[in-house]
């Protein structure tokens, strides 16, 4: 019959679309791995890369066994109610269509791998493996359930969302990037800086932090390549988050999301490049352009727009990306000043831009796009809505608080620290 | 209702398809950047890469603000008539479905980035930025309007095309590659060769041009990687140009285009490899195979078939690629003889093959495929049509003339030249 | 009409899907090329890469002219009967929809390029070219016809399959990987090890084999990148093998296949990493983790699940990948012991895992998925079926025997050997 045929056709499109998006997001693993490899010293390249590899594998097995169950278990059933953790669908049991798992796994792996670069050269393999499994199997799923599943207390797709709207985190500025970035921040603070970066061998602070550039030749080309790979992958990351492409008029959301992603990336790159040039001109009197800042500014633009890419106008996406790029420069310099050693600038890129992006959705979301994407005409502050901004703030604070608590209780801190003695 | 449902399904496929194609074309940025990085000396890698980055970002913002309006503004309205430049849809205002913009932006960025490699090591950042914005916001859109929009005087999709057929430039041998390649040629002639390439420090011509290979280790693997990335991206570039995949039988065009692209790439590679081997054997008496020629021959084959990939038979695609590969070798050697310094051979690959490809469409287009793709049974010279060849020739001359004029009037030439003093 | 419209829509999806899958599989060429480049010594990088390039080009032309005809010629006609080699559709004549060719070409190129790495540093260019054309135009197509075409005596889609079920080789553990891996094994045995690898210059066996690592700096990042590229490509490789995505409920197969691919890759990686760590701990007393083994274990997991990814449960995919990863370590060490020099471990990864994967399909295939994918409820041994396991064993033996015979008769052996004198 007609209905059965068109449903099968639409299901085919949706499954294919999620495969496309998931494969692009998965490919970002290559980008993150190269980014790390380009930023660490040559004798540590192999170790850092192995961590990236284990992130992908650990996330896959961790998310299959328990992670998915914790995140989405039972939540497609409308009667299920709200909960912080799921207890069905372990090992994908009872799940008929696996394509959603595939897409969510790719996100989980991304969240885990954000941390690998920050910890470069400082963490034992077994400690890292313990971290990786804990993050992808427990922490990340709990965050996902709260914000993305129908059972989440913050979810915008719940039957009865918080303050009538819930939190809008379309593709994960909060879920993926704040979670990953916050983990990176806490871990690097526990582990302390690389030997010789901020302190001399006797522990006396250096007057100037020592640059520790990657020792590979050709590093800039490595790292630029990564930036393009990540930007490319972001088309899957952001656009894919529509999930059900074939629903009425969702194809308009698809294109709009991709366009906003593009514009925000460009604006972030240009903002960071020019701000860093202006700053360095004021200090040194010479005009010079820094590729590293341009590239990380681009990534910051991408992270910033991730929460709101489907619900804001294109000019707003440019503003969000532009401010994200400038924020990146500021936070990056702040970290160095506070002697926090982040080898790949993952904290400013993912954590700072993630927070800004989550808040920005509460400012710029338009009623028209909110209606199309979330069936809910509540809008951002600049369009007269205040509930959304409140939800966004609660969401951000929730993640930060969760992490602060988990960082205290979970044994990883101790493990990380004890293992630190073992090498450099 | 049935019609509404199937229309939504078809729109979903088309938007998804354009996202797929645009993301692949965008990924070519990584290929072009690596190609450049592999060919310049190590101290200039960072500068060259930053240019690539700015190309992508500049094209995105330039094409959003004014470029798209100049190229396609108002042209979807049949009443609009012909014009050289559009004056609607600035900032995407009034555009409901953004997916076409996304795809066109990716093309625009490609056209801009072709030039980065040629100018390696010779152009100031600010001058380059001025060039990049001018190309993507003004020059390229004017060319696009003439050939691809319904309002273009050369367009094959206009209501009343030139000589009953208009110019067939399916995926942009003319629009993208001649425009990019011609810019590269003019810029390198204005800037002159790298110091020490053809002349000694006192300006005396060298007996033999000095090879200036990239100093990165592992360069060949970099560059081969790029070739595969570009070939991969070309599946989006050429196949994506169908735009409306869901129209009746367009899926046949899709596959045919992809197959022709593959065969032409292979033929170009093999032609260039063997011609260069034969030439070097005649001069040195030794048989040796040159990877660089093979890879650029492959790219030449891809550029050559870009104009005609949807309207020629597969054996014709092989011939077009084969001749493109041989032409590349000839033009590359000619440039060296004329002491024109093209660090990445972008002129022979993009300009020479672009011209050949545009003409080839006027020779090999078959009535059957012209009917399917352009609703017009006019064919190439070898199938008894002459109008198409005439249109193709006019198109090529138009671009070359446009550029010759713009090169005189626009201030970039002066800027480029004056900045040249500043550094090597 | 309704039927015509929905058929066109479904055809569009299928053609687009095959283009997506083919482009991902094609992109694996970049992964294989980099893998080779990372493993050979610097002065041989250019030669090795040129072989990779020629594999892609040779496969394209060889498969267009005769390969496709030999493999699938006439076999879509139900009246055609069984045969070992086709004799229609040369030069794609009479083929209306080219998308199937595109996908099959990408597989053919993969099969050819598996060999390039193994022979690193030992084979003349002309000999290699002869090999490459022979493999992609003759050997590979004959294998494909037997197993994948409707005319194949082993085919699971034939009207009257062997023992009522035929051989299940969903995405080519047998067809692609055993064929490629067996070629690699025979060629490396004919050519002998690299000079100095196992024997000193006078031919005396060394006490310990000499490690010959790639001399590029940054090699680990190269090679990890490749692993991710290949894993990424595998989503096209395995999922794409559904071919007709739009058939009733095939989208469920799509997602299931992609999930199984992911899990098996992860399991293979972890198995190989830990087994190698345990072994090295027993011999040296120190715990160390080896990136190379992790990555090749991952590839072994992917190869192992390729035959059965659509017809086994997810937990079975994990077991298959896990055992594949362990088998890889064993066979890799065995080859070194037998003084067989495989520069990139292609034999353990492709041949050993290919054989294991083909057998595993005969053990783990479930009636439910067999019904959906092959319209045939025959299942693997663990579900009470024996016919399938018998077919799988016949298939593996058939390929091994074919190659043993061809290795004797075809002139490549002699050519390879005679050319060996020419250079190291």
Image (tube, coloured by chain):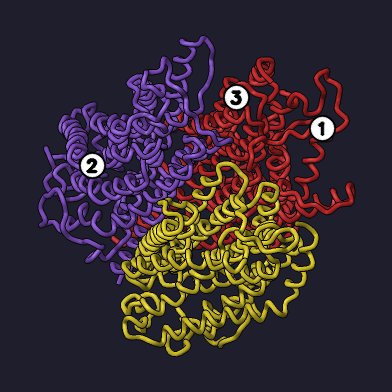
Chain colours: A yellow, B purple, C red
Have a look at marks 1 and 3 and say if they share a chain.
yes
- Tell me the chain of label 1: C
- In the image, residue C12 sits, relative to residue A155, either above or below, namely above
Q: Residues within 10 Å of mark 2 (few under 14, many from 20)?
A: some
Residue underneath mark 1: C209
Instruction: Identify the secondary structure beneath mark 1.
Output: loop
Single out the mark in the foreground, 1 or 2. 1
Residue drawn 35% across the image and 19% down it: B337
Q: Are marks 1 and 2 in contact (CB under 8 Å)?
A: no
Q: Is residue A381 visible?
A: yes
Mark whose residue sits in front, 2 or 3: 3
Residue on which disc 3 sits: C128
Mark 1 → mark 2, Cα distance in angstroms: 65 Å
Q: Left or right of C33: which side holds B181?
A: left
Classify mark 2: helix, strand or loop.
helix
Q: Secondary structure under badge 3?
A: helix
Q: Sequence order check: which comes first, mark 1 or mark 3?
A: 3
Does residue A327 sit above or below C188 in this rendering? below
Q: Which mark is residue B371?
A: 2
**Badge 2 sits on which subunit?**
B
Tell whether label 3 touches label 2 (CB within 8 Å).
no
């Amino acid at each position: 019959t007609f209905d059965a045929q068109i449903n099968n056709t639409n299901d085919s499109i949706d499954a294919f679309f999620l495969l496309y998006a998931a494969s692009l997001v998965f490919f970002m693993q290559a980008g993150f791995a190269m980014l790390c490899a380009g930023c660490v010293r040559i004798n540590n390249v192999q170790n850092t890369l192995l961590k990236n590899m284990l992130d992908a594998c650990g996330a896959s097995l961790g998310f299959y066994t328990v992670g998915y169950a914790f995140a989405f278990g039972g939540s497609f059933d409308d009667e299920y109610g709200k909960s912080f953790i799921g207890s069905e669908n372990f090992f994908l049991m009872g799940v008929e269509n696996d394509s959603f798992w595939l897409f969510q796994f790719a996100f989980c792996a991304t969240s885990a791998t954000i941390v690998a670069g920050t910890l470069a050269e400082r963490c034992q393999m077994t400690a890292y493996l313990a971290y990786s499994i804990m993050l992808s199997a427990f922490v990340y799923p709990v965050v996902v359930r709260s914000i993305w599943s129908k059972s989440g207390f913050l979810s915008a797709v719940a039957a009865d969302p918080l303050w009538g709207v819930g939190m809008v985190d379309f593709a994960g500025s909060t879920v993926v990037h704040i979670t990953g970035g916050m983990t990176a921040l806490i871990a690097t603070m526990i582990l302390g800086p690389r030997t010789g970066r901020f302190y001399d061998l006797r522990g006396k602070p250096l007057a100037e932090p020592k640059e520790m550039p990657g020792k590979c030749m050709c590093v800039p080309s490595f790292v630029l390549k990564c930036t393009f790979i990540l930007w490319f992958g972001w088309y899957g990351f952001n656009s894919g988050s529509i999930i059900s492409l074939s629903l009425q008029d969702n194809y308009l959301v698809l294109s709009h999301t991709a366009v906003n992603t593009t514009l925000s990336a460009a604006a972030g790159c240009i903002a960071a490049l020019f701000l860093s040039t202006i700053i360095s001109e004021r200090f040194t009197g010479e005009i010079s352009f820094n590729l590293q800042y341009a590239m990380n500014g681009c990534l910051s633009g991408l992270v910033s727009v991730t929460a709101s890419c489907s619900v804001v106008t294109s000019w707003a996406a440019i503003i969000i990306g532009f401010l994200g790029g400038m924020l990146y420069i500021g936070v990056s310099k702040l970290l160095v000043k506070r002697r926090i050693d982040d080898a790949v600038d993952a904290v400013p890129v993912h954590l700072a831009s993630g927070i800004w992006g989550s808040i920005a959705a509460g400012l710029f979301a338009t009623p028209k796009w909110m209606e199309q994407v979330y069936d809910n005409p509540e809008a951002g502050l600049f369009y007269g809505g205040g509930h959304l901004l409140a939800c966004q703030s609660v969401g951000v604070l929730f993640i930060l608080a969760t992490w602060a608590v988990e960082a205290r209780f979970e044994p990883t801190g101790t493990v990380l620290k004890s293992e630190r003695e073992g090498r450099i």
